Image (spheres, rainbow, N blue to C red):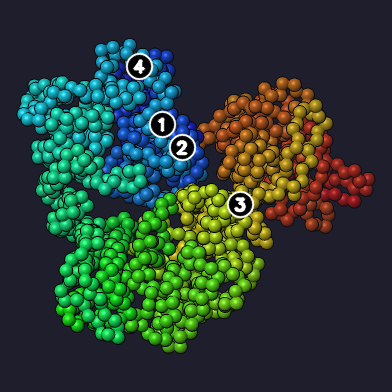
Amino acid sequence: MAHNKGSSLSNSRGREIYVGSEIRDSISLLDVLYSNAFEEEDIDSAVAKKTEVDFYRGAPPQWLNFCWAERATSADKTTPFIKRDGYTELIDNIKKRRKGDLTSTMNLLHQPGSGGTTLAKQVLWDMRKTLRCAVLTGPTSDITAIAKQVIHLFTAGSQGQQNTVLLLLEDERILDNLQGAIMKEIAERNITTHMPVVIILNCVRKAVIKQEDHNNSRHVILRTKLSEAEKQQFEEKQIEISRSYSNEHKQFHGFNIMRENFCGDYVKETSAILGDVRKNRRPKNSQLLAFLSLVNAYVPGSHLLQSQCQEFLGPPDPIYGGPSFEQRMKPFTHLIVTFPTRQGQDKHVRMAHPLIAEQCVKVLATAGVTRSDTARNFLTEFCREEVQQFLVQDMLTKREMGEERKDTFSRLIQDIEGEESKSNVVSVLQLASNKFKQNPFFPQNLARFFYIETRAYFKAEKWAKIAKDRDPKSSFVADTLGQVYKNHLKSRIKVEQGSSFPKEQGSVRFPKEQGSFKVPEEQHSISAQEILQLSKKAFDAFKDEERAAENEQGADMQDDGMTKVSRIFNNRGLFGYLQVANIVFDSLVSLDNNWQKVLTMEISADSLSIGQKKLFKYKPLITSLRDEVERKCEFFDGYLTYSKPSIEKNEPPYIWTDVKNCYRKYVGTCTPIHSQFAVGIPLQKLKEEMAIAFPGLLSCLDKGYDESNLSRITTLWGEIKKEWEKKKKHDNNKAAQNFILANIILSKVEAASPVLTPLPILRGILEKRLLGNFGNQTPEFYFLGLLLFWPEEHKKMGFNVDLNKCVLEMQESFENTYKKHLRSRYLRPLIFLGKGEGLSRLVHRSKIDNLLARENPMAGPDSIDQKWSLGEVWRVPIVQDLLLPVIGVVRQHRVFACVDGKEIEVCADQRSKVWKSGEICFYLGFTIRGPVAYGIHYPSHSDRIKEEEPRKMLEVPDIKLIEDGAVRSCTTCANVMESTNWVQVEPVAITKEAPMFSTSPPGRYECRVSGLRWVCKTYVSLQYQFSSWEPHRAMMKSLGYKQGGPLLDVTVISGELEEVQLPHFACFGDEPSFKEKVRVLHVEDSGVSVEQVDEVTRFHVKILHPSFSPKGVLVRSGFPVKAHCDLLLYQANTAFLTLHAYLVPCDSSVEQAMKKKEQSYGYRSIRKPQPVKSLRMKDWFSLTTSSPSAEVKPPVWFELPQNINLIQKAIAILIS
């Protein structure tokens, strides 16, 4: 796209601002669609036609395609650019998000070849005048740089010219990181805005569209299937194309395939030209077509560079007079497309359509050119390591999501195995491994194929070690070796189960008092030694993986430049260890039940030394198993309780099942022989209840424990606490915190349980430890401190705990304890602050889940999870009745809770909800990192809660309690229509200088202070304030208008208005054509405009479906105007009755200004009825008194001026 001095971007008012080269250069990673794209250019019709032909043939759309089609349509030369059915849904979703969060995402899921990219770009083109549209085209390795450029695009222009960015993204892997980086940039630059900063349109190719995708409101689906309406559009366009391109349109495969509703017959007919291809001595262009087919069939949307294709074809080069690339590809030219990318870059080459690519692969395979032949030929003859590595990696290693779960291997590998043989898979992966000698993923996938598909475990071991050597710091690569050993062990046990073999030589013997292994006459062929031998290899491999994972840093953690960076913590080493431990336990116990006693440490492993030297070398492994299992299960206890993969996604159920089973086998059955006697039994009982650690206690309610279970657990922790305090154990804080938490959890089941310890005693236990060592506690301890010491409503708290310090210490403790493991995961809310007192105000998350399930018994867990992820849970009445709304404030994107006269900093659950500084309300929850604000809402202040009425924070005022105000009267215009039945509302402002706020349910409202009226069909929140007319007087005069009322700046915070009515003071009682003399001034960042009104009533003008910016009523100059007036009187406390008097038009902004001014002098207002009829501007009026014994000295006269800024004060003294 050509750039000239006139490149422009839209602002939020729909106007355009011009940008210079410095802004364009600063957003080089983005292909920005400027709002005036092509408008100042004379487009070469030949270029436009060539671009159109390329598009119909199958090339991706260029911006010129949309521009050319738009111009032709406007000139009635062609039918409009075809819009797939998802177009309207996308537009509507984007419009909704314009009223939403700072950053938001919507996904366009499209099956390959269905036109998803075209649809997405079409939406950007059509919204270029409304939003700042761009496509991310640069490298995605530097997320921070992308975020900075997105923000730069948002803020481009002078102050007040910001506008939302609509960003098209085609790499979903960077989505979460990009949103986080954008929010971080917003906070660092302290950007305050009333609009979203960016809406990300994530365009995702997805071969299999599942039902859950349709159920997600963030998804728009595009399939390879046309609706009847779409078919009609394509038929109309086909008639037009056949006229314009009579000789070419039959080869417009991109268009024709869609017109034929993706019909297989058309694709087969088109690809039949390959039927004569033979395997041997194929010409270069036939080989190149096979490469393109393979690449586009298995990596849709990919391409090869034309320069590389030319190089493969060999001389003569077109540069030196040889035939063009298209000529050299004959007779296959019509099956491929070439197209430019950015200006000056090499052209791209790809197949005309993914379906053609897939069909060509099948035809070639039938002709003897198999997929593996093409893949090997591509690797040896075409690939250069530095260019093609990632394309080959996607083809051979990228696993797609199937109907139920992720595929085991890439589609190409699965097809080679299914259509050819396993040996061909091996040869392709071996060739790729040898071709790209530094890449670990090819040997890793070869190892996976060997152990999963061929069960060649020794070969799998070899290639897994090669992969590990290539990237020794990667825990994810290291995982494969552990999986090889684990699956080898499983395979041996499965294969040999049920078989009978001779006795094992040298059986294990135990002392008689401990029992002995029975030596069965017939037993399994796998011996205890073999089980331990294989399992030791697996255990060691998973430990290596765990160490590598511990050494990996997250992208948001301090990096030394040498450490491996991973966005998430890899838990597969820990989990793999537990899986192997499960296998070992089951397999050894199946040999003899006495192994259970050894593995659980109920009896000593020294028994192995008697007559069994082969097993003795495994004694360290056997003796360490229980403790290792317990440590790893404790990790998962916290990992799964405190966090989940994301707000939308839960952990697979099998993880918790395997962890729980392993724990119960090794730990939850008996007391180990090395336990301390005094507390060993109580501790073991708690382990059997899986309530030995803080996370386990928290999840007791999720497990469905009843009062009996919880009473027993609470009692046991009380005993342990006393015993450890007596012995002054260093970790008696752990016993204290678990004892306190057990009481809290028990109180959720039975608040009157006799086992419960009174709250003051629990607070005392905690306060003593907090004050004794405030800065060196666990996150769990600070968590309890916040729960117990968070101030209660209307109650003086008799303790001295600095909650702000507690929050800071908790966050630091979290950083040191959990951040590495929980990075990039969503921290679950564990407890919420509810209504009530004491422990009863603490609401466990499970209670909300149970209420939601009870309200809708037919809804499954997925439905409830979706309510949480979409934030719908905060709008559910039963949840609102349960939780306590909290008043807070936002400053520089930081959130503070206002409690007990203090401000305590809390985190925002969704940072994108924090728009601007100002008062907010929310529900308070507690994660393991600290307090969090959920359901953040910027309320209108008419529903703001008074300190003594915190319950009404999120409620709209009861309309029954609001009286209807009296309608103003004027005898001059009694004949003019005026609507009634308006509910009078009192706005609220935090300070006298701040804007006014109102919130209202559906209805008709009038603000008592400003006179503003509005009508709404849904709940709406407004912010409004008076603005000055002064900057606009010269313009008004030049247009022949004068002021007719206050200038009001109105912002709709949430909801939508059907109409708004602006107050005016003009009296039209004897002027029948008054509507023609009234207009509204519309103030925008780019200037001002004058608009017509929908209706003029006695005291207001009506505007339907308004858009907002400062607005005020204008009256045509040149004819005498009467005004509804007020006499404002202010009295001073002096010896004489001194008055300040003003005769002013009924303008609430003037009245507010006068009131503020006079009160600053110490004057008070005297209420007086307004004049009963209107007064003429520029007339003079006198002030008199009706009292016969009083007079006004000196005599006072008023002139009623046309310019309200010229209002003069009259000072009078009444002497009686």
Which of the 4 image quarters holds residue 56?
Answer: top left
Separation of disc 3 and disc 2 at Cα?
A: 28 Å
Packing grade of label 3 (10 A; few <14, some 14-19, many >=20) is few
**Residue of label 2:** 94
The first of marks 3 and 2 along the sequence is 2
Q: Is residue 876 left or right of residue 243?
A: right
Give, as a three-letter code, the residue at label 1: Val
Give, as a three-letter code, the residue at label 3: Pro
Does residue 164 show up? yes
Separation of disc 4 and disc 3 at Cα?
A: 54 Å
Separation of disc 1 and disc 3 at Cα?
A: 37 Å
Q: Is residue 733 left or right of residue 317?
A: right
**Residue of label 3:** 877
Q: Are marks 3 and 2 in contact (CB under 8 Å)?
A: no
**Residue of label 4:** 238
Residue shown at 40% from the left, 69% from the top: 813
**Residue extending furthest toward the right:** 1188
On-image quarter of the N terminus = top left
Of the two numbered discs 1 and 3 in the rendering, the one whose residue sits closer to the viewer: 3
